Amino acid sequence: MEQQPTVAAARTIETVFRMESPRIIAAVARIVRDVGIAEELAQDALVAALEQWPRDGVPDNPGAWLTAAAKHRAIDLVRRRERYARKLEEIGRDLDTTTPFEEPADPDDIDDDLLRLVFTACHPVLSAEARIALTLRLLGGLTTPEIARAFLAPEPTIAQRIVRAKRTLATKGVAFEVPYGPEREARLGSVLEVIYLIFNEGYAATAGDDLLRPALCEDALRLARVLGELMPKEPEVHGLAALLELQESRAAARTGPSGEPVLLKDQDRRRWNRLLIRRGFAALGRANAVATGAPGPYALQAAIAACHAQAYAYEDTDWGRIATLYGLLAARSPSPVVELNRAVAVSMAQGPEPALTIVDGLADEPALRDYHLLPSVRGDLLARLGRTAEARAEFERAASLARNERERELLTARARELEGP
């Protein structure tokens, strides 16, 4: 009778697999050149572990055991293919001598494979939604139900998105490699964008009842840190890591006891995580140290976040410098959202009138037509100018556009505060 793993053993195996699966999939994908097949073979190794470890005990290096088991299945698969001789030549003769429980000789090789997997999962041939789902699945170790819950999407939708993404990579013949030259710069932008979008969804959830989704922030932060180790000479990689560290440092102070949003000016800065702030400053220092030209968009945003982190009180914030940095960001990476953020900084540095001019200039921007923060910012500026009725209407409009319940409640409350007698 086949032995079933105990609950404790199964939990241990699944925890190890979640931690090691990105490296396992990366190592196997280098052999089979297909991330979909690589994921299946990694799952086969997990099944083998569930069968053997409760009987034989957990190996000293469980990650190496799983990697070796998956690689052997990959080699067997390649050998069964019609043109296995050519495939075997591509992956190298050394694979023939790999034993099932051998620890990889050079950890850097795994890192190289992991970097290839990052660039493959974030390939521009995929839509942004597909890149995010596939990255969370392959590199974040999240299951399909977990991704669906994180983005408030039906499980079948996420499952189909992942399947189509893997099929697209295979049919388009996307190489499992780290690009170089101009293509690398373009592809790196896609990688950073995916991590940035994952973090943003966790930092300020688009929809639902909760303002924050901490698990997504943690996944994005972990991916940014891994990428920083794999690409130490890329300033924007460190810039993104710095930005996420500094933004995440405020997490504990951003919501009240009932989960309600707490505005920046009202946050208890004693609750900001000083360790994450130090990590953020260190990453920003690395970005500046390896930069050879003007800072990129992520480094500039990190510098803005650093201004907030340096201020022990809201009144101490250097809004003039923040406005200048937003001006540089607008020139480097122009967008209506950046311009809206610049308007907020200008309002604090120079007053609400010049800021309102900037905001009114964004009224016809198609990208901001349904963006609730545009009327929210305008309402705040109008309130500071004493134009109460107009401000209340803007807050009401912002509340009607907000898809997140917590933000909607905050905007509705602000509108009520401006109601006349």
Image (cartoon, rainbow, N blue to C red):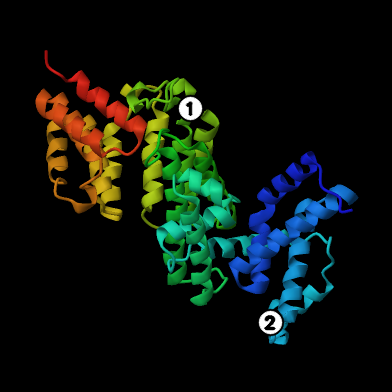
Q: CA distance from mark 2 to mark 1?
A: 51 Å
**Residue reaching furthest front?**
1
Q: Earlier in the sequence, mark 2 or mark 1?
A: 2
Q: Which residue is mark 1?
A: 252
Question: Quadrant of residue 8 in the image?
Answer: top right
Q: Element type at marker 2?
A: helix
Question: Secondary structure under badge 1?
Answer: helix
* Residue occupying the point 46% across, 61% down: 188
Q: Quadrant of the C terminus?
A: top left
Q: Which residue is mark 2?
A: 87
Query: Along the horizontal axis of the image, is 27 left or right of 402?
Result: right
Instruction: Say which amino acid is labelled 1.
Output: Ala
Instruction: Count every numbered label the image shows and give the total.
Output: 2
* Residue furthest to the top: 421
Q: Position of residue 288 (x, y in %)?
A: 45, 49
Side (left or right) of 418 relative to 36: left
Tell me if mark 1 has few (under 14), some (14-19) or many (20+) residues whose alpha carbon lies within 10 angstroms of its own.
some
Front residue of 286 and 24: 24
Can the viewer see residue 420? yes
Q: Nearer the viewer, residue 35 or 343?
A: 35
- In the figure, is residue 110 to the left or right of 348? right
Front residue of 65 and 301: 65
Residue 379 x %, y %: 18, 31
Give the label on residue 170, or none: none
Rate crowding at label 2 as few (under 14), some (14 to 19) or many (20 or more) other CA atoms within 10 Å: some
Query: What residue is drawn where x is 28% and y is 44%?
Result: 326
* Residue 1, image x, y percentages: 89, 53
Q: As shown in the figure, which amino acid type bears the numbered disc 2?
A: Lys
| Image point (16%, 36%), residue name | 355
